[in-house]
Amino acid sequence: MRTFWAAIAALVLFSACGDGTPPQNQSGPTTTLAPAAFVGATTDVSTPASSAPPVALLSTITIGDHPEFERVVFEFTNHVPGYHVGYVTGPTIEDGSGDTLTVGGTDKIAVRMEAAAGYDLSGSGQQTYNGANPIVHNGAIVIELVRSGDFEATLGWVIGVGSLQPFHVTTLTNPPRLVIDIKKP
């Protein structure tokens, strides 16, 4: 039985490695692999902050357009911080001041990053994120990003979206990035 499952696993792995076209000397119909379907949810996703310093320093934020989703990327200079990503209801409140923020879109995804900042307070006090705030996008799903706080090593941004859609969170290295894919309607 173990040999049977090993053969099935090898077949799946082998078929997933190709580009969907037959080898040069093979005859017969050409098949193409369908792109993977978007996998996401509307429930919160989180990973705790590392207990080891230093604070993760935000350097850039980008928004990319893909066929099934739009991608928001928070890039850091040193490592990815702990995070909590999820839909929020009610008014958007700015950390520290308590002021109400206006964020475009009918629904909002809060991105809270802990042990993170847009300023390097370890010495120089230099600002590490010099990008826009707010970031207006007006895409198929992402409307606007607004910083909700950069206070006591807690960095917050709110993603205003056109409707409640599933999202998927991943992290990447080299450079360190927190990636949020939001399904298009």
Image: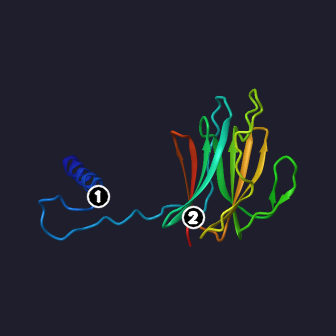
Q: What is the x, y in percent for residue 142?
A: 63, 65
Earlier along the polypeptide chain: callout 1 or callout 2?
1
Q: What is the x, y in percent for residue 178?
A: 58, 47
Residue 150 vs residue 115, the one in the foreground: 150
Residue shown at the point (21%, 68%) measured from the top left: 30
- Tell which residue pokes out farthest to the top in this image: 123
Residue shown at the point (88%, 49%) measured from the top left: 97
Determine which quarter of the picture holds residue 48: top right
- Rate crowding at label 1 as few (under 14), some (14 to 19) or many (20 or more) other CA atoms within 10 Å: few
> Which label lies toward us, 1 or 2?
1
Residue 102 vs residue 1, the one in the foreground: 102
Q: What is the x, y in percent for residue 113?
A: 68, 45
The C terminus - image quarter:
bottom right
Q: Tell me how far mark 1 sits from mark 2, CA to CA.
A: 28 Å
Q: Identity of the amino acid at label 1? A: Asp
Q: Is residue 131 left or right of residue 19?
A: right
Residue shown at the point (27%, 61%) measured from the top left: 20
Under circle 1, the secondary element is loop
Under circle 2, the secondary element is loop
Q: Which residue is mark 1?
A: 19
Residue shown at the point (61%, 68%) measured from the top left: 139
Label of residue 165 in the image: none
Q: What is the x, y in percent for residue 170?
A: 53, 50
Label of residue 166 in the image: 2
Q: Identity of the amino acid at label 2? A: Pro
Q: Is 38 located above or below residue 14 in the figure? A: below
- Rate crowding at label 2 as few (under 14), some (14 to 19) or many (20 or more) other CA atoms within 10 Å: some
